[in-house]
Amino acid sequence: MALTITCPICGKRNGYEFKFGGEERGPRPDEKDLTPEAWCDYVHMNNCVAGVQKEWWFHRDGCGSWFTIHRDTTTNFEVEKAEAEK
């Protein structure tokens, strides 16, 4: 089954309309106190969770909005927030 994503503005759509923006990492770290190695880790090192993770998505072929969803990376299905927090 193809990936479907629920846009908060447009509703449920085919995954081909979206661009993956990476996993949600929380607030961006303060750059003035960051070493080059720490900055490289923040930018390039991902958790690569096998299970549910919170992710950024861009509705490229629709409304043009950025939003987050919870997705199970093992099944490629979107998960409700309440299920993700279990």
Image: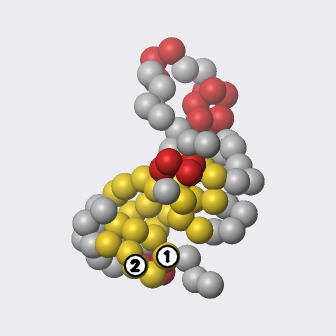
Q: Amino acid at mark 2?
A: Arg
Residue 15 is tagged as none
Instruction: Give the Cα distance between marks 1 and 2.
Output: 6 Å
Q: Amino acid at mark 1?
A: Thr
Identity of the residue drawn at 50% across and 48% down? 82
Q: On screen, 39 above or below 14? A: above
x and y percent of residue 32 in the render?
45, 17
Q: Are marks 1 and 2 in contact (CB under 8 Å)?
A: yes
Residue 13 is tagged as 2
Which residue is the site of mark 1? Answer: 4
Check disc 1 and report its element: helix, strand or loop. Answer: strand
x and y percent of residue 43 in the render?
57, 41
Q: Is residue 43 left or right of residue 75?
A: left
Identity of the residue drawn at 59% across and 68% down? 77
Q: Nearer the viewer, residue 45 or 79?
A: 79
Q: Residues within 10 Å of mark 2 (few under 14, many from 20)?
A: some
Residue extending furthest toward the bottom: 1
Q: Residues within 10 Å of mark 1 (few under 14, many from 20)?
A: some
Check disc 2 and report its element: helix, strand or loop. Answer: strand
Q: Is residue 40 left or right of residue 31?
A: right
> Which image quadrant: the C terminus?
top right
Q: On screen, 2 above or below 57? A: below
Identity of the residue drawn at 68% across and 68% down? 75
Q: Nearer the viewer, residue 21 or 2?
A: 2
